[in-house]
Amino acid sequence: MPDFLRISLRLVALLAPYKRRTAAAYGAMLGGALLNLLPPAILGWVIGVALTPAAERTAAVVALPAWLPGAAAIEARARSSGPELLGQAALLILALALLRGILGLWELYLGSWLSQRAAYDIRNRFFGHLQHLSFGFHDRAQSGDLMARAIGDISKVQQFLGQGLLEAVYIPVLFGSVAVVLFGINPRLAAVALSPLILLALVTLRFGRVIEPRFKAVQDQEGLISTRAQENFSGMRVVKAFAREPHEVARFEEANAEFLNRRIHVISAFADFFPTMTAIVVLAEVLVLGFGGRAVLAGEVSLATLSSFIFWVVLLAQPTQNLGFIVNRASEAVAAGRRLFEILDTPSDIVEAPDAPALPPLEGRVRFDHVSFGYADQTVLHDIDFDIPPRTMVALFGPTGSGKSTVASLIPRFYDVAPGQGAVRLDGHDVREVELSSLRCQVATVLQDSFLFSATIRDNIAYGRGDAEDAEVVAAAKAARAHDFIQALPEGYDTIVGERGVTLSGGQRQRVAIARALLVQPRILILDDATSAVDTETEHEIQAALAELMAGRTTFVIAQRLLTLKRADLILVLDQGRLVERGTHDELLAAEGLYARIYALQLSDQERMAAEAAEAEADR
Amino acid sequence: MSEEREVRRARDAQQRAMQAQLDEIFDHEQASQRFRSYDPHLFRRLMTYVRPYKRPLAWAIFLMAVTSAASVAGPNLVGAAVDTVTAGLDGDPTAAGTRLAWLIAALAGVSVVEWASNRSRLFILADLGTRIVVDIRGHLFGHLQQLSMRFYDTYKVGRLMSRIMGDVSVLQDFVTWSIVGTARSVFLLSFILVSMATRNWRLTLLVVLVLPLMALLTRAWSARAREAWREVRRRIAIINGYLNETVTGMRVIQSYVREPTNARLFDGLNRRNLTANLHAARLSALFFPTVDVLGSAGVAIVLGYAALSGDRSLTAGDLIAFTLLVDRFFNPIRELSRRYNQLLATMAASERIFELLDLEPEVQDAPDAIDLPPIEGHVRFEQVVFGYAPEAPVLRGIDLDVPAGTAVALVGETGAGKSSIINLVGRFYDIQSGRLSIDSHALRDVTRQSLRSQMGVVLQETFLFGGTVADNIRYGRLTASDAELRAAAEAVGAHDFIQRLPRGYETEVGERGVNLSVGQRQLLAFARALLADPRILILDEATSSVDTETEQLIQRALDRLLAGRTAFMIAHRLSTVTRADLIVVVDGGRIVERGTHEALLAQRGAYYRLYTLQWASQARAA
């Protein structure tokens, strides 16, 4: 599994900047593992030795492995001492526990430090990278999926890199060193004692495999219940309007009942495995006692050795069970890491040329030089060619899907025209060759659905220019006809709006967005003239605000309404990605082409109604 | 403005923004972290959900006793085995060998009993816990369906979700693990104490001395840890909220070249999260090793006693059994303190759930309500007074007689009372005084189900449920056949675009499905209403503009939908207004003018003013 290994290594490499802390954490962990070996030995030994009748004491003393420093001296002392040995052992155990505690403290703290720090690093990287990925990427990506990676996957990686990884090293080390000691003392008894523990590790490993998909099924079902409930609450007006409460309750009950089924599935796995694990530990004790007890009676093994073995088995039981879980956690972390690196390794489609020059302040000339463009495998624009002098108001017009929005998106370089497919030039500069921020600073976009952030109105208006003075913010709001309603809000410019703040109406949001665009003083403007048909006054105000915004700027309007088309200096008529007609409203009507046809079919209705209204107004 | 004030203001604003973000996200995440003192009344009420499962619960507790006894028997048998071996060294090895074999067999047997009893009680418990939770959740959901729109106007969806998912799962943890976890700990503790005491009561007393120390330590720690973890969750919730907004608003961010600023802001949030986590990590790093040291102290006490007391009756087996038991002694203690915290969290969660369950549905069918017979659609308001809050009437005496088959357009400024009128026709709210009747049946006297099944509603913003296009249209009449469904879609002109969707009528829509345009959603809502074939239609016209092509489709669909029905429309488009048989101008909760388009224009009154103002911009363009 080279991929598994590669990702694991990349994950571990996240700790690389913190070599000293990593070394300290693992040092503390190893020290702790070695210290853990001692108490069972001491306990078994003193219990065996001190309480064995004096006559048999020689036989009872465990034969320490010869390579142990001072083995002979310890044995000699043990043979000669009595119950007072127990008191000394008690002190020794307490001292070891303290030492072990101090090491444990460091291990725990440093482990958390490392994992939290790595999570912090990767979270920043992830965020920074997301911000630099192009519109093309964000069009395709599901926001829910990105959030899941940012929240769930980072936390999985974090959990593993700290304590998980430490334990993944600790357990084999502990197991290995206990095995060495046990085999050193008595190979046969060691084999008997350790074999159930290997079984234990295998069982837990299997448990992880079995439980994971079942858990996921429960979580999915929980997600479904949650979605059903949320939909029901959000759509309550519709539910009540159609008197569908019984239907909704039935649907919910169905999801709820399935949840019960799936959880029972999980429960049965738990009920199968946990008691089994406990039973395996007891099995190890049974084997040690059975074989060991006979061996002691036969004089082959000392009582102390037997007691120590029992304590060692108990010592290993817990970590061995954990081993299975750790392996599962590791594979989850690697899967999470893979999903994270997938995003981090995605290059942005929009790459700034190295040492790209800043775009000088623009006059506002916009030239499409035989531009063809497509998303993925689908060509959207064919050979679009036009040249717009500064301060012109251009209306982009055409049926849905004709490529209007795409033309507009190419100007601030939200997408890139492929090499050899023509070029977009602003004042003669190819947008692909200049510094991105200097380009986008001079092109502002206002769309129909204005996105506001959960922040104060002031912050939202100053979004493109954090350094703007209060007076400038107010001036922009006034020009955008937003000042009055802002003042009427509970906290004026400090009112928090956005998803989690005060809800503004569509028209109000749009005016805040216009103010936001005004404040950056763009040279080129891209608009969507489909205002939400709010009440009369607002409609009025928005039109006035837009007029203010367009004054003296090159403007591209994705046009829906007649008013805009009539006012435009130039209408570009698009059809299926081609620029089929250009001219003013009157010229295009006279040309009797596509524009004239659409006008006759659809726009004339608007005109008729407007005429009626005009008549009424004239009467007044 | 001084720099200091500037900084302070910015900071305050930022804090308020964060707080606002938190309220919703945090509400959801935090359910398990809120506590309330123990309240016997709440607890008893919670137990009413447990009562149907009394028998399995009793059975589980019995099995628990068996499991605990078996688990305590283990160390005792190990001790006895060691003693047998010791005795065998002194005396008769053969007899000892036989006795050892028996003891080992007993140990194996006990282990099998433990395995079997543990297995069934785990299953019974978790099964029972889940059933109880499923009951509570179903009960809560069913109850919520009964509550009136007034409730949904004020209670945010986020908070409701937090009740039905977060709080309910706190209950799940409680009933699944707490009730019996507590029983288990109590059994284990008492069995361990008994078997230690029968071996040596003096030593047992000494070991028990460690207990208060452990309890104090745990208590002091959990209070701090709770705070620390709460802060950790708060921090990560802020990060997630910010991330979510960034992902959604990415286009604006890149358009305004905000990347560097946002990266800096994010780093700040991220760093505060790191700090909070490290604080929590320090607490854990102190606590767990200390607990281990205390555990070892218990072992040291056992050995020290054996050395110092000169108590010759202690055998090697006793010492081994004691050490093994001491090891198990501390787990139930820690468990009990954890359960106590869980009990407090459960109290808080169940209080919030019961609060909801105690809300009386405001709009209820009268006890003697009759089913509304098939109606003609003659709607009559007589001196109807209504307010969302009784002391602030929104409608102040509405008189309106709408013969069957009449299309009424309601016009007026925002807040004039148009929406209230249509809300009353659907009986989403009850009137305060006056009389509102359909075909001379007072709305109060009929069942809501029979009323609404004869009514179709199209709202301003079309709500689509998760599911297919077909499911969403069929919402209007669940029993409709595919052919009827398709006919409805064709009649409103939705069929064409539906056919072009990747999977036609089977295309998934809603949050996880394809994105439909505003106009397309509206056409679906029309099809839904048409399929219901209502006698009375309520239409709150959408305000957002759609492209001219779709606009025409919608207008045609409207013709089809209105034909032969009584309709109440809140109109935003001129064409809709002029189409109505009767235009009603509402102002300040009263009807100020009524009549046809021409008649009202000629009157030069409120309608005329509204009209000239409303379409003036288009007029000037023409």
Image (spheres, rainbow, N blue to C red):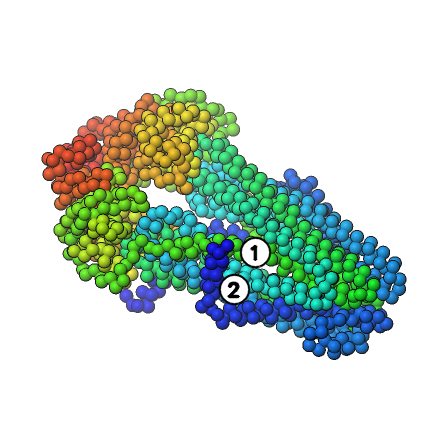
- Disc 2 is attached to a residue of which chain? A
The residue mark sitting in front, 2 or 1, is 1
* Quarter of the rendering containing residue B215: bottom right
B120 with respect to B473 (left or right)? right
Q: Nearer the viewer, residue A103 or B268?
A: A103
Residue at the extreme right: B92
Q: Disc 2 marks which residue?
A: A112
Residue drawn at x 35%, y 40% as measured from the top left: B515
Q: Where residue B225 sits in the image (x, y, percent)?
A: 55, 62
Q: How many other residues sit within 10 Å of disc 2, few (<14), some (14-19) or many (≥20)? A: many
Instruction: Confirm or deny contact between disc 2 and disc 1 (CB under 8 A).
Output: no
Residue drawn at x 84%, y 70% as measured from the top left: A56
3D distance between C-alphas at marks 2 and 1: 19 Å
Q: Where residue B70 sits in the image (x, y, percent)?
A: 74, 52
- Disc 1 is attached to a residue of which chain? A
B326 with respect to B84 (left or right)? left
Q: Nearer the viewer, residue A591 or B430?
A: A591
Tell me the quadrant of the picture where the C terminus of chain B can be found: top left
Q: Disc 1 marks which residue?
A: A327
Name the disc covering residue B601, or none.
Answer: none
* Quarter of the rendering containing residue A338: bottom left
Q: How many other residues sit within 10 Å of disc 1, few (<14), some (14-19) or many (≥20)? A: some
